[in-house]
Image (cartoon, helix red, strand yellow):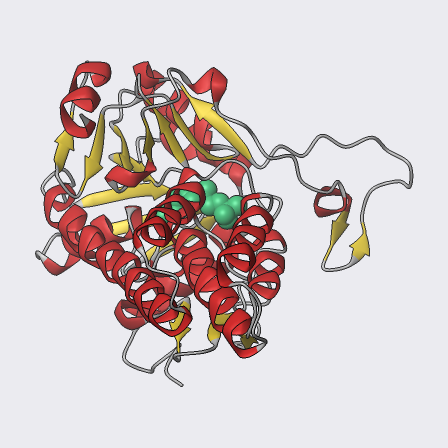
Amino acid sequence: MTLVPGSGGRSINALEWTGDTLLLLNQRVLPLRESVTRITDSSGVAHAIKTMVVRGAPAIGVAAAFGLVMAVQNANRKRLPWREEFRKAAEELRSTRPTAVNLFWAIERMRKEVMRLPDEPEGAAYHLEREAMAIRDEDVAANRRMGAHGAKLLKSGSVITHCNAGALATAGYGTALGVIRAAVAAGKKIHVFVGETRPFLQGARLTAWELVKDGIPCTLITDSMAAVIFQAGKVQAAIVGADRIAANGDVANKIGTYGLAVLCRVHRVPFYVAAPVCTIDPAVRTGKAIPIEERDGREVTHFLGTRIAPDGIPVYNPAFDVTPAKYVTAIVTERGVLRPPFPAAIRKLVR
Ligand code: MRU
C-alpha cells in the first residue's frame, strides 16, 4: 500500500483502487495519524464522503465513481439486478454533499456509461471500472496541465491559499497546490501562507502537511490573521480551488474564500482560482443558485471532541461561500487560463 510514500507530497494519494476495494487516506485524522480506511461497498463510500474521510471536490467525485463500481460488483456477487443496485447507490452518493459539482458530474458520467452497456453483469462491472479509472487518471492529467498554465501567473514571492486544494483533494497533484508545485518546479522562489481554515482545519492539517512533505517554504496563519499580512504587503497573490463555478464565473469554495478575495481587491493583489473544467456548472447561472452545505454545529462548538463553547449556543456552520466573479482575476483550467468577462470565456470553453 503506497498512499503515503516517503518520496514527498508529489506522490501523495488520497485514494487507491485495488480492483475490489477503495483505500482512503483518512483525512479526518491527518496529520496526527496516517491511517488508511478500507471500503468495500458504495454505502461505505457515501459515509466516507459525508464524514470527510475523503474530501475535496475532485476526490469525492472519483471516490463516488469507485463506489458505483463496487455497487455493481457486489450486486453480481449476490446475484442482484445490477442496474437497480447502481441506481440505489447513485442516489445515496448524490445525497452526501451538495456543493461540489464534481460529485454529481462523476455520477452522471458513470450513469451515461451504464446506459450504453448491455445487460451482461460481468461486462458491466468491467466497463464501469474502466470508466472510474479514466475519471481518476484524467483528473491527475488535468491537474498537471493546470499546473503548467497556472505556474506562469505566479511570480517569486508569497502566495496565500485557503483550505486544501492539493493532492489530498484530488486524484493527485492538486489544483491550487498543483499550480504552486508547478511554479516551484519551474524554479520560482515561492513561499506559501496557509490559512488554517476553521472549523475543519483543512489548511492547518492537510495543506500544511502536503507543503511540509514537499519541502515548499510555508507559514501557517489563523484565518483572522490574513488581513494583517495583506496590510503589511506580504502577499503577492492568492490561489484557491473551487467546488462549483457558475456560468457567470461566481466561485463556490471553502468558507472564508470570499473574505480572502475581498482582501485581495482592497490590497490590489491578484486572486486566482484553479479548477478543472468539470467544476464549471453551466446549468447554474450565478452563484446564488449554488447549494451551500451546512454542517453539524459541533464542528464549531467542539475542538478534537472537547466542547469549547457553551452548551445550547446556536451555531451557523456553512461549509462554503460564493466569491462573486468580479473579485476573480483569472480561473486556471486544464484548457487554459480564463480571464474576465467570464460568462463569454466559460461559454466558449463548455459549449
Ligand atoms: O469541505 P471540503 O474540505 O471538501 O472543501 C474543499 C474545498 O473547498 C476545496 O478548496 C475544493 O474542493 C477544491 S479541491 C481541489
Give how far across and how far down residue 116 sits, in percent. Answer: 30, 51
Instruction: Depth check: give the residue in front, 174 or 211.
Output: 174
| 55 on left or right of 175 | right
Q: Position of residue 172 (x, y in %)?
A: 30, 62
Question: Where is residue 310 drawn, in percent x and y?
Answer: 88, 40
Residue under the image location 47 percent in, 60 percent down: 68
Asked whether the viewer can see residue 189, the reply is no
Say which residue appears at 58% left-offset and 37% top-offset. Answer: 319
Q: Is residue 5 above or below residue 211?
A: below
Residue 187 place in picture, x, y as percent: 9, 57
Q: Which residue is farthest front?
A: 119
Query: What number of labels is visible?
Result: 0
Query: Along the line of sight, which residue is nearer the eye, 2 or 188?
Result: 2
Q: Residue furthest right?
A: 311
Q: Quadrant of ligand 1?
A: top left
Question: Extreme bottom residue here?
Answer: 1
- Answer whether residue 115 is visible to the viewer in this image: yes
Q: Nearer the viewer, residue 350 or 196?
A: 350
Q: Quadrant of the N terminus?
A: bottom left
Q: Residue at x 25, y 61 (%)?
A: 134
Q: Work out whether residue 280 or residue 296 is closer to the camera in this orientation and state it.
A: 280
Where is the C terminus found, in terms of image quarters?
top left
Residue 160 in the image: above or below residue 2 = above
